[in-house]
Image (cartoon, coloured by chain):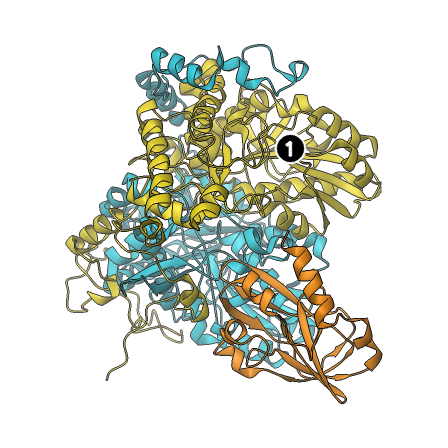
Chain colours: A cyan, B yellow, C orange
């Protein structure tokens, strides 16, 4: 199958106008000795039916959809209204590029403007950018932004921050002279206040805390904010499960200076980890240090409202090595899906979905901890995930449940050696009372 | 024409909410006790599905897009996005797979990643690939980090990265983010790198040269083998920005030119939709010596099955969560499988044919600052029109909108004043190319006969020229509820 | 014609000395090159400057230019009006559009700068 639109006659006519006999002559500037001189070693071309059959077969080797899954940990199964697929699948949204020419891109630009507004409302901040790659890279960008704001170089990161976010921050900052130190967690699963107090000195650039944190526990943000601001450090709050913002108070109202996170829960499938949606919001005063694209409102020559990409002087195509970030292409289409999702659910639908997640997780936690030997690892309040302390190695238990068609959760041992028996279980609105019961019965059986 | 409001302006809290099934577990007592919760999200919309559908359908109609017509945005490779690829990416085995699932349960996903890496190795002549980078700029960052880690393992990461003055802005920005000092290399009078000048600039402090080939003028760096030799002789590495791979597929491979590290853009060369500005994907290819430093995890074959290797002590780490923009990788692989070896070669052949057809048709009417042979794109400027009539590339671009086309890339590369950078791609028909050529010719005539038409263009768009200065001087970057009078 | 009572730098700043203090701005040529100015990042009062030190940036919609200190000294005042009205740099570069004032550390620094006629010669050279 080919997507070329030229006939043989077209090609001859075009070559004649150019004044060459064959296409090959157009490559005269490529030295002969560098050329491949053979066919690429790739499988032969496929027709559309063959392609579909081929990929059906490959996709079928992923058996995951046949399991009852309680996996979360930064990627969540939530219901996606049909309108999200129908509208975001329109070619007018899928097939344009970045809105460099605003007069023919008002659709994309207005969507970004609405998206920025929604993110501000959800996070409680003044301004938001048009999106970043994902929650982890947004966390890294937030740390770099904090350094631009106060020039300090010691960063504190909660140990309950998503381990992959933590590793991403390490990679981004490695060659820039920043150091990252852990702040531990207490028996409630929340930030260890004493550890924070001990490490928080005047040379600390900023602290990054996730809430709900990697263990699903909702942090006490105001308490941390007070300590951090006492040292003029930047308080970064990461939100990996953005649905929580439908019910939990906005981090911006609880003292956050930068709120960053992962918007996958807003209408994006788990998709084996991507494409997802990084978001970032901050206070007005930090506008010129915010990385990424920003849409702004203006007027056209006839006085009509319109939108443009603005404040581009922060960006790489103008400021080059002095830019706030190297980001160019971001996740605009994912931001579009989030916008459609949030506007379809509306305030009431978002709140109800968030509440159902909390109720179901609470019900599951109650049911599972009635099993002999199974406890909640942490005592702090949770959103839709929690850590079970099992009487044996969690990875082994998870494998046992897999044989029963259940993916019960993420064993924490590989990332947290001290939580070898910890299993991170996620229960969202897509789980039913029956599925929770099936998990409980399965767990009972394998622990027997 | 319907003027579409912001959703916030048509919101009404009294409207029926999106319905979920009734809660099927007992309501937990004291669920929110002691928590900071919100009773209201001020300004958050509440509208019906009907209103949402009309809102986004109307907004969609204010966008120009590839599905509508020629989109000759130079350096962005706006080619047709095959519909079947969307369907493939929507298969449950891909779209519903959870990234934390045990590898045994996501074999299909791992197979896609491995197959794409293998195909990209063959197409580029490099030895290993990672698909983790989310877009070209993140690919550049990963590439520079790999170079840094590799050189450091040899004792000295070095200090300087050389970058031609015609390069994309992401190049210096990515090198800087990796801790390198950027030093610019001036283009020679043909728009290429001058090997003699390069030889003077390359010292033992130089970690790498970042080259784009074909460069941003659409000109092939014919001396690329010499360039590689000069950089390698001083122990540096050659990085290639693969943004312009569309000109090369199946004809010549970066690995065979002496390139050590390369990123490519799946959303350019391999047709995945640009989505209004992402998601993209920027896989990075490398020579064997850099393999130990690849981001984790790496997909590896263990017997019959595929697995994820996290135990890589020399790895640079990771630059995002999970495995990259996976569904973008699915679409790119589907494209490569559809085309096969000849089809992939045809990408380069026809994109170069189409670009040269446009160049030949407009030469003399628009100025070509550099007349070196064009590959997949050509860079004209507004020089002739500006001198004769005062109209600028901005006016020409805006007038193209009235003629029904998306404007080319403007004012880039920086070494061409008033640039109009045209990249038609291989999927355009002759009829569409001719239409665009005729529009450009008509605009030249209009510039000479009635330049005021261009100065005030566009005339037939949803909005007319927008005040970008006002937007930047007084930024309004979110909706706010109007204050009561 | 550029004002005769000023000294100029090759980066297109002007400086007006008055006793121990001096006022600094960018030239008419510089503002035209930049286009509509949308933002001026000002130095903090009290900042001690060396010759040619970067002290801020000046931004238009699609360009950024650094502001260098033409001489050594200490910043004593900045033009606060530019926060709300950056267009003053375009409209009146040698007057209302001034950027900052400094206390001169070494009056001899002024000697190294261009006179009006030298600057005009330089501008004429740039036209080609």
Image quarter of the C terminus of chain B: bottom left
A55 vs B191: above or below: above
Numbered circles on residues, count: 1
- Give the left or right position of residue B70, taking residue B313 as reference: left
Alpha-carbon neighbours of circle 1 within 10 Å: few (<14), some, or many (≥20)?
some
The image quarter containing residue A37 is top right
- Foreground of the two, A387 or A383: A383
Q: Position of residue C105 (x, y in %)?
A: 81, 82
Q: Nearer the viewer, residue A251 or A120?
A: A120
Q: Is residue B194 above or below residue B166?
A: above
Outermost residue to the bottom: C19
Q: Position of residue A130 (x, y in %)?
A: 43, 56
Could you tell me which residue is drawn at 34 percent across and 11 percent down? A9
Chain of the residue where label 1 is placed in the rendered structure: B
Kindly tell me whether residue C106 is visible in this rendering.
no
Q: Residue at x 43, y 24 (%)?
A: B357
On the rendered structure, is A115 left or right of C38? left
Q: Position of residue C39 (x, y in %)?
A: 52, 70
Q: Quadrant of residue C106?
A: bottom right
Q: Which residue is mark 1?
A: B190
Q: Is residue B150 visible?
A: yes
Question: Position of A381 compared to B212: left or right?
Answer: left
Give how far across and how far down residue B407 sits, in percent. 39, 42
Indicate the secondary structure of the residue bearing disc 1. Answer: loop
On the image, which quarter does residue A402 sit in?
A: top left
Vertical relation: B464 (above or below) B481:
above
Describe residue C109's horizontal placement relative to residue B32 as left or right.
Answer: right
Give the camera-side residue of A4 and C89: C89
């Amino acid at each position: 199958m080919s997507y070329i639109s030229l006939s043989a006659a077209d090609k001859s006519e075009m070559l004649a106008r150019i004044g060459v006999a064959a296409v090959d002559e157009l490559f005269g500037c490529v030295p002969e000795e560098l050329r491949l001189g053979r066919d690429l070693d790739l499988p032969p071309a496929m027709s559309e039916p063959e392609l579909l059959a081929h990929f059906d077969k490959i996709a079928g080797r992923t058996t995951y959809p046949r399991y009852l899954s309680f996996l979360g940990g930064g990627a969540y199964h939530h219901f996606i209204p049909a309108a999200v697929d129908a509208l975001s699948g329109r070619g007018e949204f899928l097939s344009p590029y970045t809105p460099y020419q605003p007069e023919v891109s008002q659709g994309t630009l207005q969507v970004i403007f609405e998206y920025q507004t929604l993110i501000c409302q959800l996070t409680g901040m003044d301004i938001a950018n048009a999106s970043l790659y994902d929650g982890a890279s947004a966390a890294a960008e937030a740390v770099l932004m904090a350094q631009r704001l106060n020039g300090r170089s010691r960063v504190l990161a909660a140990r309950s921050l998503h381990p992959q976010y933590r590793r991403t921050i390490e990679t981004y900052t490695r060659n820039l002279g920043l150091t990252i130190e852990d702040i531990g967690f207490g028996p409630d699963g929340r930030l260890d206040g004493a550890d924070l107090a001990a490490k928080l000195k005047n040379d600390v650039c900023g602290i990054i805390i996730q809430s709900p944190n990697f263990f699903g526990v909702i942090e006490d943000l105001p308490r941390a904010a007070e300590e951090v601001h006492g040292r003029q450090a930047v308080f970064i709050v990461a939100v990996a499960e953005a649905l929580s913002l439908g019910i939990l108070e906005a981090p911006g109202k609880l003292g956050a200076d930068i709120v960053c996170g992962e918007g996958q829960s807003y209408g994006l499938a788990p998709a084996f980890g991507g494409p997802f949606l990084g978001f970032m919001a901050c206070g007005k005063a930090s506008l010129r240090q915010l990385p990424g694209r920003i849409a702004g409102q203006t007027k056209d020559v006839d006085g009509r409202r319109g939108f443009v990409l603005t404040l581009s002087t922060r960006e790489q195509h103008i400021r080059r090595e002095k830019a706030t970030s190297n980001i160019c292409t971001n996740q605009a289409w994912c931001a579009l899906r989030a916008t459609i999702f949030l506007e379809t659910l509306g305030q009431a639908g978002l709140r109800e979905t968030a509440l159902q997640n909390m109720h179901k997780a609470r019900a599951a936690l109650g049911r599972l901890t009635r099993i002999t030997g199974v406890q909640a690892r942490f005592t702090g309040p949770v959103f839709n995930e929690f850590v079970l302390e099992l009487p044996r190695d969690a990875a082994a238990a998870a494998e046992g449940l897999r044989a029963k068609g259940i993916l019960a959760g993420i064993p924490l041992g590989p990332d947290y050696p001290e939580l070898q028996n910890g299993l991170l279980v996620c229960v969202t609105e897509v789980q039913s009372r029956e599925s929770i019961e099936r998990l409980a019965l399965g767990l009972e059986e394998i622990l027997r | 024409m319907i003027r579409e409001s912001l959703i916030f302006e048509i919101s009404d809290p009294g409207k029926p909410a999106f319905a979920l099934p009734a809660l099927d577990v007992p309501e937990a007592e004291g669920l929110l006790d002691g928590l900071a919760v919100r009773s209201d999200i001020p300004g958050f919309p509440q509208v019906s599905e009907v209103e949402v559908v009309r809102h986004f359908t109307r907004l969609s109609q204010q966008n120009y897009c590839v599905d509508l017509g020629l989109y000759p945005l130079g350096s962005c490779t706006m080619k047709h996005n095959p519909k079947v690829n969307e369907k493939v990416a929507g298969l449950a085995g891909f779209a519903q797979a959870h990234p934390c699932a045990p590898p045994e349960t996501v074999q299909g996903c791992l197979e896609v990643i491995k197959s794409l890496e293998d195909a990209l190795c063959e197409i580029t002549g490099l030895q290993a690939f990672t698909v983790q980078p989310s877009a070209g700029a993140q690919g550049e960052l990963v590439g520079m980090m790999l170079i840094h880690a590799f050189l450091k393992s040899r004792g000295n990461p070095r200090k300087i990265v050389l970058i031609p003055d015609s390069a994309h802005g992401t190049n210096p920005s990515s090198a800087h983010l990796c801790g390198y000092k950027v030093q610019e290399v001036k283009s020679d009078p043909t728009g290429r790198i001058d090997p003699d000048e390069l030889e003077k600039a390359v010292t033992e402090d130089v970690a790498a040269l970042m080259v784009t080939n074909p460069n941003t003028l659409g000109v092939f760096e014919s001396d690329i083998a010499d360039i590689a030799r000069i950089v390698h002789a001083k122990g540096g590495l050659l990085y290639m920005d693969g943004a312009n791979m569309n000109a090369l597929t199946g004809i010549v491979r970066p690995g065979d030119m002496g390139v050590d590290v390369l990123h490519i853009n799946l959303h350019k060369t391999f047709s995945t939709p640009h989505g209004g500005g992402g998601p993209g994907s920027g896989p990075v290819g490398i020579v064997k010596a850099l393999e130990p430093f690849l981001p984790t995890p790496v997909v590896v074959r263990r017997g019959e099955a595929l697995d994820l290797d996290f135990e890589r002590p020399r790895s640079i780490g990771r630059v995002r969560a999970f495995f990259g923009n996976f569904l973008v990788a699915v679409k790119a692989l589907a494209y490569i499988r559809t085309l096969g070896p000849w089809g992939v070669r045809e990408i380069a052949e026809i994109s170069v044919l189409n670009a040269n057809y446009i160049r030949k048709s407009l030469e003399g009417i628009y100025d070509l600052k550099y007349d070196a042979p064009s590959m997949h794109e050509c860079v004209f400027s507004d020089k002739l029109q500006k001198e004769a009539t005062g109209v600028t590339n901005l006016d020409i671009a805006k007038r193209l909108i009235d003629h029904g086309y998306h404007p080319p890339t403007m004012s880039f590369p920086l070494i061409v004043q008033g640039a109009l950078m045209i990249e038609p791609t291989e999927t355009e028909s002759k009829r569409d190319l001719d239409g665009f050529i005729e529009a450009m010719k008509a605009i030249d005539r209009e510039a000479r006969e009635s330049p005021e038409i261009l100065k005030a263009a566009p005339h037939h768009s949803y909005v007319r020229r927008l005040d970008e200065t006002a937007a930047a001087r007084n930024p309004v970057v979110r909706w706010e509820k109007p204050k009561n009078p | 014609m550029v004002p005769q009572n000023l000294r100029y730098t090759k980066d297109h700043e002007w400086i007006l000395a008055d006793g121990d203090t001096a006022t600094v701005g960018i030239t008419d040529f510089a503002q035209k090159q930049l286009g509509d100015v949308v933002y001026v990042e000002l130095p903090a009062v009290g900042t001690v400057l060396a010759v040619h030190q970067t002290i801020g940036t000046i931004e238009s919609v699609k360009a950024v230019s650094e502001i260098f200190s033409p001489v050594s000294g200490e910043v004593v005042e900045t033009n606060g009006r530019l926060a709300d009205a950056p267009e003053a740099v375009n409209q009146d570069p040698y007057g209302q559009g001034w950027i900052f004032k400094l206390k001169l550390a070494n009056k001899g620094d002024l000697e190294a700068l261009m006179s009006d006629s030298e600057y005009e010669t330089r501008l004429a050279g740039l036209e080609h």
